[in-house]
Image: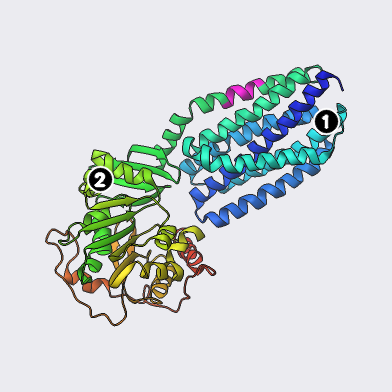
Amino acid sequence: MTPAGRGTEIWLLATTLVVAVAGLIYELIAATVSSYLLGDSVRQFSFVIGVFLSAMGVGAWVSRFVVDPVEGFVRAQIGLGLIGGFAALATFYSYATMGAVALPLYGSLIAVGVLSGMEIPLLARILSEIGAGRFRFENVLSVDYLGALVASLAFPVLIVPHLSLIAAGLAFGLLNLGVAGGTLWLFRARLGQGVRLAWGASVAAVAAALIWSGPLAGAMDARLYEDDIVLNTRTSYQQVTVTQFRGRTRLFLDGSVQFDTGDEHRYHEPLVHPAMAQAPRRARVLVMGGGDGMAVREVLRWPGVEAVTLVDLDPAVTTLFRDRDDLAALNANALRDPRVRIVNADAFTWVRDAEEVFDVAILDLPDPKNLSLSRMYTAEFYRLLRDRLSAQGIVATQAGSPMFAPDAFWIVAETLSQEWSVTPYQSYVPSFGLWGFVLARPAGMVSRQAPYPDDLRFLTNDVWAAAQVFDGDTGPRPVPVNTLTRHPLPMAYEAGWNAWFR
């Protein structure tokens, strides 16, 4: 083989690695976008992977009808640069303007899958045509699989923490177009002017969109949120958005509202104070979730609190609500209190490995939308939590809506009842609707009620008594226990919310 031919072979094998990385990145972006906009990450990732791999199979079959493998490969790269690059942008735009997700998401995913499936067969034909020394198809596949490993490691570690999903798609679109450009130059003698013009126009379009991806994302966020956006950032774990309107501040995580200062007291006071009032001792308090510091603020209203441990996964959120003055003011600077220790860790792992003992545990954890979050609502998790509590330790958890997802609410209560005596209760929060909580205390423990702090805005003894009354729509029902090996909770959660809102 001539030196020029050897250089072409090296380029094509390197190209195999690059296109494998880009293809898997598009797949991961699509799965992340779908779980972000549609919920239920397990289902969405499963659907995306299945559709993408099936489309790749179609692409591999279609590649046999491509007469010129070089031109076919270059055109496939141009198509991937455009479709893959703009897929996330188009999906978010469709969702922001029309509320539609499935058509742009799965339409672009199928197109990207077909084009990606054509790549390896076409590259193998090109390598064979140029007489690559000792060409073996398994060498191409080995490089392709290596690219998949690189992409799977780079996506959560490098891409998500530093690029928006829109910018990431466009950046890898340019990568595909770079591959097309290099191949165009190597095989310039056999490719026509039309392919060059299409490549140049595509590069210009994707590069311009990448340069303006920040303003474009901001414009779409403005359509998604009714209020003025004062903070919008992507952390290693989630999209964090803070909005303001007419003196009210709202926090959104991955597009879901977490609190509205107009009514958050109707959520945080019932979450915290019934447990604190019934605890015989409240010197050491554990708060899990609630990185905004609102639950910690309520805990610190009680005399006798000596230490509060806040366990929240995302350090970016706890840092924002501790260090940024306007956000810290919302929790009355609770996270700056010297009695408060912040631990950024997975709740399940931390409870399993911790050694401290607490008098009260307040669980302000995310809704059990998927299996990962459902772990924190299992019998195994509650058994671990029981070991972190004193003999008379009290637990209170948010448990979702007994109106919109009643089965899910009562599954939480039933699962807690495997370890404790439980008291389910509810509160109407305008931002969420009717919302449910469960108080758990050791079986046989005498119920007692210390006076609530004087400055509460919502919770009183009468409100507490009424909160324990459920009607026929929201009342108890036979439900299974949620466990690590069997997760009925996320399915019940999704079914309940879908029945109302989809």
25 sits left or right of 497 in the view:
right
> Residue 485 at what x, y percent from top left?
54, 69
The quadrant the N terminus occupies is top right
Residue occupied by mark 1: 127
Q: Nearer the viewer, residue 227 or 188?
A: 188
Which stretch is magenta? 200-206
Residue occupied by mark 2: 248
Callout 1 amino acid: Leu
Spatial distance from mark 2 to mark 1, Cα to Cα?
62 Å
Q: Nearer the viewer, residue 189 or 90?
A: 189
Residue closest to the far front: 355
Q: Is residue 205 magenta?
A: yes
Tell me: residue 7, above or below residue 289.
Answer: above
330 sits left or right of 208 in the view:
left
Q: Please say whether residue 370 is visible from this viewpoint.
A: no
Dot 1: few (<14), some (14–19), or many (≥20) neighbours within 10 Å? many
Quarter holding residue 274: bottom left
369 sits left or right of 289 in the view:
right
Dot 2: few (<14), some (14–19), or many (≥20) neighbours within 10 Å? few
Q: Residue at (17%, 67%) from the top-left corner?
A: 460
Tell me: residue 179, above or below residue 333.
Answer: above
Q: Secondary structure at mark 1?
A: helix
> Residue 10 at what x, y percent from top left?
76, 27
Callout 2 amino acid: Arg
Residue closest to the far left: 454
What secondary structure characterizes most of the magenta part? helix
279 sits left or right of 385 in the view:
left
Q: Residue at (34%, 38%) from the top-left corner?
A: 231
